[in-house]
Amino acid sequence: MLYSDKVMDHFMHPRNVGEIEDASATGTVGNAKCGDIMKVYLKIEDNIVVDAKFKTFGCGSAIATSSMATEMIKGHTIDEALSLTNKAVAEALDGLPPVKMHCSLLAEQAVKAAIKEYYEKHGGIPEDKMKFFDVLDEDEHSV
Amino acid sequence: MLYSDKVMDHFMHPRNVGEIEDASATGTVGNAKCGDIMKVYLKIEDNIVVDAKFKTFGCGSAIATSSMATEMIKGHTIDEALSLTNKAVAEALDGLPPVKMHCSLLAEQAVKAAIKEYYEKHGGIPEDKMKFFDVLDEDEHSV
Amino acid sequence: MAEKIVKRVYLDNAATTIVRSEVVDAMIPVFTENFGNASSIYLEGQKAKSTLEDARARIAACLNAEPSEIYFTSCGTESDNWAVKGTAFRYAKKGKHIITSAIEHHAVLHSCEALAKLGYEITYLPVDEYGLVDPAQVESAIRPDTILVTIMMANNEIGTVEPIEEIAKICKDKKILFHTDAVQAAGALPIDVKALGVDMLSLSGHKLHAPKGIGILYIRKGVAITNFMDGGAQERAKRAGTENLPYIIGFAKALELSLSEMQANIPRIEKIRDELIDAVLDAIPHVRLNGHPVKRLPGNANLSFEFIEGESLLLLLDFMGFACSSGSACTSGSLDPSHVLLAIGLPHEIAHGSLRVSIGKFNTEEEVMSIVPALQEIVQRLRDMSPLYEDFLNNKHTPYTPCNRCAK
Amino acid sequence: MAEKIVKRVYLDNAATTIVRSEVVDAMIPVFTENFGNASSIYLEGQKAKSTLEDARARIAACLNAEPSEIYFTSCGTESDNWAVKGTAFRYAKKGKHIITSAIEHHAVLHSCEALAKLGYEITYLPVDEYGLVDPAQVESAIRPDTILVTIMMANNEIGTVEPIEEIAKICKDKKILFHTDAVQAAGALPIDVKALGVDMLSLSGHKLHAPKGIGILYIRKGVAITNFMDGGAQERAKRAGTENLPYIIGFAKALELSLSEMQANIPRIEKIRDELIDAVLDAIPHVRLNGHPVKRLPGNANLSFEFIEGESLLLLLDFMGFACSSGSACTSGSLDPSHVLLAIGLPHEIAHGSLRVSIGKFNTEEEVMSIVPALQEIVQRLRDMSPLYEDFLNNKHTPYTPCNRCAK
Ligand SMILES: Cc1ncc(COP(=O)(O)O)c(C=O)c1O
Ligand SMILES: Cc1ncc(COP(=O)(O)O)c(C=O)c1O
C-alpha cells in the first residue's frame, strides 16, 4: 500500500473535519499551487485547546495529518500543542512515504499558525515561545 | 530455413565430391582465412568436360554451390562451362541468402581457374576467352 | 463509505491494459516450445526466426509499412529514446536543434532534456487550450540547424489528437525528419504510416492488451539514425539484444485484433465516454472537461473538479472500486501538477484536481456510468472538507503562509 | 544420414535456454490478474508495486545486494549499454578513457565503439591463450583519465572465468568504477556482489531459464551514472518504461531456483562436460579444446576441429538432431571468425572450425554423450571433402587465388 493503515483510517474517517464558528484563532498554511492548503480552527479556553477542527485541500496524507494533528492537541495546553512536531504526527500515523513528509510539516505549521494568531490577538507572542514559530518559515524539503 | 531445400539437398548429398586422379586441370580459389576454399578438378577430352569433381572447405552454401557448379558443367563443352555464371548457380539452387552470394562466385571462380590452368597447359588462353577470366580478380562483395 | 466494495471497475486503460486472453494464449507456447535464439542456424533457431519474421510482417501489414521498416524494442520509452537520441547523434554535424511540444510524454521530453545537457537546443512548442499543436508554429520554428521534429499523435493525459499529417507534410517539404509518439493512438485510431507521412513512429504493446515490455519503432526505409542499443546483429544490426519472441507474437496478435475490432469498438467506447462526460458535467458543478471536444481519443475523459485535490479523489474512488488516474501514472511520485494540464493553461490548483478516466474495450457502459454517483458523493465530501470551497462559498480568500517549496 | 532424426538434443544453452515450467507458471497469472501499472496508486497498481518490490528483494538476496541496488532492464545488452555509456556520459569531464578486454560480448564492445565515435578512447586488453585477462595489465592500463574498467565475469564463447575479484580490488584501490558482464556467469557460478567488490554487474534472464527480454543492472549504492532510458520515474527515476512485471517475477523465480539447485547441478554438468571433452579428444584427431582447462563455465565445451568449417558442422549436427553453436549466436550473419577465438591466438582457418557445446540443467549425460559418434562421423565426412585435409595428408599446400574480401 501507498499508505499505512493508520493513514488510510485517518484519511477515510478524518477526525475533526469542519469549522469552529466562534474559533479563538485559525491558521492557514500551504498553497493551492502545490496542491495542499490546511486551515486549522482552534477554540482555546484557559490556555487549553478545548476544540480543534480543520479543513484541508490536499492529498490523502495531507488530510490524514490534519486529522491526526488536531487529535493530538485537542484537550491539551497551548504549551503542549506548541511542542507538537511534524515527526510526532508522522510517527503517530505509523510513518509517511518520504515524498509525503512535507504534509506532516504542513500540519505542524497550521497548528502553530493558529496559536500564533491567538497570541497576537492576546498581547503578542511571549519571548520564550518565539522559537516555536521558526518552523513557519521552514522549507518542508528540509524535513 | 536458412537455405532453400535445393541448397540443403546439395549440401546434404553433394554431387561430385572427390578428386580426379588424372585431372586435366584443377582450380583452387578462396582463402582459409575467410572460411572458404574450393578446389575443382576437371577431366577434359575433345573440348568436353567429361568429368568434374570438387573438394571444399566452407559453409553449407559453399559446399552446395560447388556441387551445383560441377553438375552444371559436366558433359558440357569448355565454352559452355566458361559461360557459367555465379547467378546461374545461385538460381539453380533456388537462391542463396544475401550474405552467402559470394559462395556462388567462388564456385564460378573455381571452375574458371581450372579452365584457365587447362588453357595454360594447352598453348595459352585464346584471345577471345580472356574476358571470362576477369572474374578471377573480382571482389565477391560486388556480386 | 463503510466497507471496501468488492467489484472493481478498471478505468485506467491509458496507463496500462490487461493482457487479453488471445494474446496470453498466443504467447504461452513460445516460452517452452519455440524458445530458440532467432540468430541460431539450427532448427530451433530457424523456427524462432520464421515466427519472428512472420510477426514482423503481420505488424507491418497493420501499419501499412514494409516489414523491413519495423524494429522491435523493449517499450514505448525505448522507441522514443531511440528516435530522438538516434537522430540527434546521427545528425549532430548538420545541426543540434530539435522541435517538440510542451505536452509530450516524459519519454520524449526527458530524452530531449538529456540531449540539452549535451549541447542540443530544444524548442518546446506551446499548445492551445485544447492541447493542439499549431502546424504553422512548427513551420516557423524550423531553422537551418533543425534536425528533428517530434510531436505525439495523441496525448496520454487529455487525449487530444494532433494534426500529424499536416506536420509531417511540413517536415517533408523542409526535409526535416519527423517522429511521432503513437503509443496512445495505437488501438484507438487507425495508423497508416504512409498516409501519415511520418519518418518514425513509436508504439507500445501494453496500451493495447499486449504485455508491458515490448515496443516498436517504425523507421521509414531510407531514414538512417544511430543505434541506441549496441551489441549483437539482431534487427538487421540496428537494435541489439536477443529477441523477445513471446511478446513480439503477443504484440502482433494484439495489434491485429485491435484493428479488426476497431470499427465496432470505437463508436461504442466513444458513446460511453460522451455519456459519461455529459452525466458528470450535469451532476456536478464546477467541473471542466480538458482536451479537445472532438479531436480526442475515443476512451479519454479528463475532468477537473474545482476546489479538490486529485490524489484524495483517486483514493476515495479506489476505495469505492474505481481505478482511475490523475495525470500520467508515470509522474506519480512527483508532487508537481501535470505539465500537460499546465500547458493548456489550467491554474495549478485546478490542475491538481483533475481526473483521467480512460475507457477500454472490456468496460461496459453500466460499469463506466456507475462512477457518476460515486464521483458526486466523493467530490461533495472533499469539497465539504476544502478550505478553497469554503472561501468560494463565502466569496472570500483566506490569507495563507506562502509555500517555500513552490516559491523557489 | 538419410532421414531427419526426430529426437532433438539442445546443446546451446549459452545462446539461450528454455523457459522452465516453474517460471512460466509464476508469470502466467501476472498477465491477467496482476496487470496493474506499478506507478498507479489504486489497488491494482499497488498490488503490482508490491509484487515488483518483492521480486526485487528476492533477487537482491540472491546476489547479496540491497534491493535498492537492483535495476530492471530489458536485457543483458541494455544492462551493458547502460553501465558503459552511463558511466562514460557521467564522467566525461573527469576523463574519456575506458578499459575493456578483447573478448567481451558485442554488447560491451559495440557500446565502446559507439563511444569511440564520440571521442572516447578505449583500451582493449589482450588475453592469454586460455582467454584470461591479466589483472596486472589492467592495473598498468589505468591512466589519470580512466573512468571505467569493464571485464566480463565469464566468456560466452570459450567459457573462461575471469579473475573479477582481483580486478575489482585494483579498480577500488585506484578509485575507478568497475563493471562486469555476468550474463553467462549467472546460474553457473554463485554471484555475491559484495564479495566480488564490483560497482556494476549485468545479468540477463534468458540464460537461466527465464525469458528473453529481461535484464538486471546492479549498481552499487553510492555509484551514480547517467540514465540510459529517459522518461517516467520508474526504477527510482533511473530507468524509465512501464515495468515488465511478468518477466521480473520470472527472473526472480529462475534466479532463486538456479541458486537452490546449483550445488547439485554444477558438479553434474561439469562431469558430463569433462566426459564429453575427453571422449571427443579421444575419438577424433586434430581437435583442440579452447578456453581454460579449469577456470571455465561448468557447461561450456569449445572445440576446434582442424580442416573443417563450423557452419557445415552445425548444419550436419542439426540434421542429426543436435543444436550447437559455432562462436556466439549473435555474430551469425557475419562472415568473420569469432573475435574471441582470434584473441586467444587461433589462426583464422582453425577459428572457423570451432564448435561450442553448452550443457544445461535439462541435458542428460546420455544425450550429451550421443553427440560423440555423430561428431566423429560428421567431422570425417567434412574432412574427406576438405582440400585442406587433402593437403595435410599429402603434406603439401595447394596454391590458391587470394580472396579480395579478406585482403582489404
Ligand atoms: C556475455 C553476454 N553478455 C551480454 C549478452 C546479451 O544479453 P541479451 O541477449 O539479454 O541482450 C549475452 C547473450 O546474448 C552474453 O552472453
Ligand atoms: C504517449 C506515451 N508515450 C510513451 C509511453 C511509454 O511507453 P512504455 O511504458 O511502454 O515505455 C507512454 C506510456 O507509458 C505513453 O502514454
Image: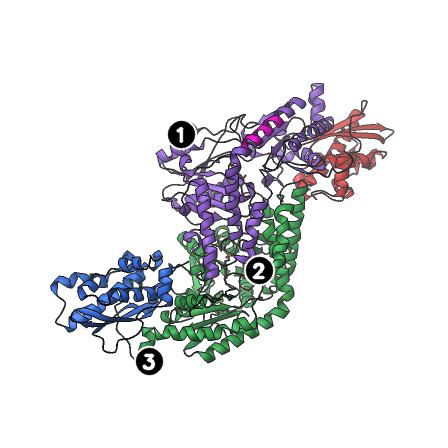
Chain colours: A red, B blue, C purple, D green
Residue C284 screen position, x and y as percent: 67, 24
Magenta segment boundaries in residue numbering:
C266-276
Q: Residues within 10 Å of mark 2 (few under 14, many from 20)?
A: many
Q: Check disc 2 and give the amino acid type.
A: His
Q: Name the residue under label 3.
A: D393
* Residue D237, disc: none
Identify which amino acid the numbered label 1 is placed on: Ser
Q: In this view, does D75 lie above or below A49?
A: below
Q: Position of residue C119 (x, y in %)?
A: 44, 43
Residue C172 position within the rendered picture, expressed as x and y whole percent measured from the top left: 37, 35
Regarding mark 3 in the picture, which secondary structure is present there?
A: helix
- Residue ID for mark 2: D209
Q: Does the magenta stretch include residue A69?
A: no
Q: Are marks 1 and 3 in contact (CB under 8 Å)?
A: no
Q: Is residue B27 left or right of residue A23?
A: left
Residue C271 falls inside the magenta stretch = yes
Q: Is the magenta stretch mostly helix, strand or loop?
A: helix
Furthest residue toward top: C395
- Which chain letter goes with mark 1? C
Q: In which quarter of the image is the C terminus of chain C?
A: top right
Pick whichever of labels 3 and 2 is earlier in the sequence.
2
Asked whether residue C24 appears in the rendered view, the answer is yes
Whether marks 1 and 3 lie on the same chain: no
| Amino acid type for the residue under numbered disc 3 | Leu
Say which residue label 1 marks. Answer: C140
Q: Is residue D218 left or right of residue D157?
A: right
Mark 1 packing: few (<14 Cα in 10 Å), some, or many (20+)? Answer: few
Residue that sits furthest to the right in the current view: A46
Question: Horizontally, is D177 left or right of C280 in the view?
Answer: left
Depth check: give the residue in front, D21 or D359.
Answer: D21
Dot 2 falls on which chain? D
Q: Is residue C89 visible?
A: no
